[in-house]
Image (cartoon, rainbow, N blue to C red):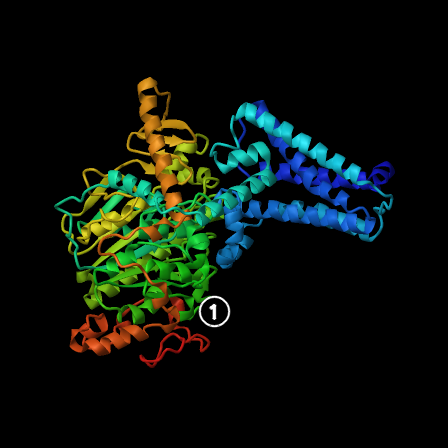
Amino acid sequence: MKQTLAKVNTRVGFFGFLVGCFWLKTIYAYFADFALGTEGMLQFLLLFLNPIATTILIFGLAFYFKPAKLFYPAIMLLDIIDTVLLYLNVIYFREFTDFMTVSTMTGYSKVDQGLSGASLALTMPHDVFYWLDIVVVIFLLLFRVIKVDRRALTNRFAFAVFSMGALCLTFNIALADMDRPQLLTRAFDRNYLVKYLGLDVFTAYDAFQTHQSNELRSQANKSEIYNVKAFTDAHYAEPNPQMFGSLKGKNVVVIHLESFQQFLINKKINGKEVTPFLNQIYNSNHTYAFDNFFHQVGQGKTSDAENMLETSTYGLPQGSLFAQLGSDNTFQGAPAILGQDGYSSAVFHGNVASFWNRNNTYKNLGYQYFFDASYYDTTGDKATGYGLKDKLLFKDSIKYLQRLQQPFYAKYITVTNHFPYQLDDEDTKDSKLKAPDTDDSAVNNYFVTAHYLDQSVKEFYDYLNQTGLAKNTVVVLYGDHYGLSNSENPTLAPLLGKSEAKWNAFDNAQLQRVPFMINSPAINNGYVDHTYGGEIDVLPTLMHLLGINSKEYIQFGTDLFSSKHDQVVAFRNKDWVSPEYTSIDGTIYNSKTGKVIHPNAKLKKELEAIQQKVDTELALSDTLNQQNLLQFYHPAGFKKVNPAKFNYSNGLSHEKRTENQLGDKSKSLFDTNGHQDTTKLYKTDAPEANEPRSDSSRIQIQNPDSNQEK
């Protein structure tokens, strides 16, 4: 013990001790929290080696602070910063099965409210290990158990430490290149970079890539839009003549089913349907439903799904497009396109307006109104960590929905079915659904909150039918992304009739299916469509149903009802799925059997062509968004959005003025219903609905001509 302390009492020994501690907890994170996976001894060796080089390089910077009074605070600060980076990635990986990018970090202020709410639920008892060494070392320094070494060290020694770290890193990269050639020049999955080179190298590499992306944006060239337009023109699928315009002039209500996966549809747990009402819609002859519809989100999760539905362009390869580019980019999205056709537009969401930077992005998309959390009473038990509970969101939105001029395009973003899938006991006390009993509470609770969401949608539908609004409305329901992560899927497997032991990457890919339903009384020939498609395909499909041709617009999706629809569904990480084949990390599976395929020369050429198309499509979408190329493209008849026109703090003052100006010609539900308030027609069993309202939240502008804030 004394010999150990004697070594630690030197600067070199103290440095080595901290490097060793950080190496240990990094290795611990690799095996306890990061699902990196290793194949062969070389990958296993690299996993153990890769934290050493960067830790030496980073902690070695403290040697440039020659006085002892600066060396020790400097190296402890570097240790703390690197530990924070490691731990944030641990928390992030538990939720997203991915690593934090620089774009995610710089956009954190846009999403911190929601992420902070989930972070506590994501912590685990063993997390103390990530911080224990720092606490112990600080304690030992303060009580002088570890002595401060005041002997001088030269810059030459500091450079020698740096050189040793650089040599180790070079050796690490060389070994990695032996197993995965061109690791840093080809676009591999982020897991590969961390597995081969470590978290610090990945972060530095990502920072460099982000800087390059920002440089590209600053040098945007108008001519590049022609390459993008040429691709989308060649990819365009003409509408089905029997479907085109079949829902023209209808109101559109988009219901965003948070974290809702396809396997929930028609699923029973303990003999009870999880989503009985959504099952009814799904199987109705008034619904076009799709059972091979996939989410295609990246790190932007919900915001990526919104972007794809609104614009038919992909999210970014890193971070959230809404958070990173939404404030400044030019969009040609659904609210603006339908707005040219006489539609009013609104979003209803019970979270703060700044979450995912929606308050800025929605204006650039052309949304006239955004009713965020400030328009509702979210006090007490009325809200979860992600906003107002779904039953209350639908109920409390009616006062605004009834004043929108018809036809309208309205989007509801639900939140209750969001990790960690928790509800108050009073919200579930009358539920007949008994949760499954697995070892994972998230898996168990997922079915309970999905059941609550189903009840919420039913109550909203009852209102639409009660007021007659349903007759002239088409409701689009879709799941935005997976609810249970890949790490939880093996636990879920037995509930789906599959083997936990045999669960693999193919099964994970198949679980990325989410519901997509188009429901309206105007549809009388509904069916379950087995066509493969994804969120990128929603906008052109919806536009064609409403009688608006998508040909003039730059859209990467194609009409799901078209005979020329492209059934190759691209994922954000460049994997893809089709009716015949599924490509996951370069491995090809038969989409029907799940068996690995070893293609012959002819099939290999066909598969390479598909992969090239997927890569090109994603790259062109990235170029379009990262360089803001839509500022240079003006579709015939489309008027560019002016975000300055929209003020989300003024509520419905504009709509009320419009009603007054139109008089008897007003088409809002309020006016067509003889100026009768329809809010009393809304029925909910939400226990919080009867709680007294807080005076701290003003929800309605009393003077329709006033510009005061709500």
* Residue 225 image offset from top left, x and y in percent: 33, 45
Q: In the depicted view, which residue is nearer to us: 458 or 556?
A: 556
Position of residue 664 relative to residue 569, above or below, is: below
- In the image, taking residue 372 as reference, residue 678 lies left or right, namely left
- In the image, taking residue 656 as reference, residue 562 lies left or right, namely left
Residue drawn at x 25%, y 73% is 678
Position of residue 202 relative to residue 434, above or below, is: above
Query: Residue 424 sits in which quadrant?
Result: bottom left
Residue drawn at x 25%, y 48% is 540
* Residue 331 image offset from top left, x and y in percent: 34, 54
Can residue 282 be seen in the rendering of this structure? no
Residue drawn at x 57%, y 31% is 196
Position of residue 129 relative to residue 499, above or below, is: below
Q: Which residue is mark 1?
A: 380
> Where the C terminus falls, by quadrant?
bottom left
Secondary-structure class at tag 1 = helix
Query: Residue 408 sits in which quadrant?
Result: bottom left
Q: Which residue in the rendered view is the most extreme toward the top?
A: 601
- The amino acid type of the residue labelled 1 equals Gly
Task: Count neighbours of disc 1 (C-alpha within 10 A) and say few if under 14, some if 14 to 19, many if 20 or more.
Answer: few
- In the image, taking residue 634 as reference, residue 131 lies left or right, namely right
Q: In the depicted view, which residue is nearer to us: 170 or 659?
A: 170
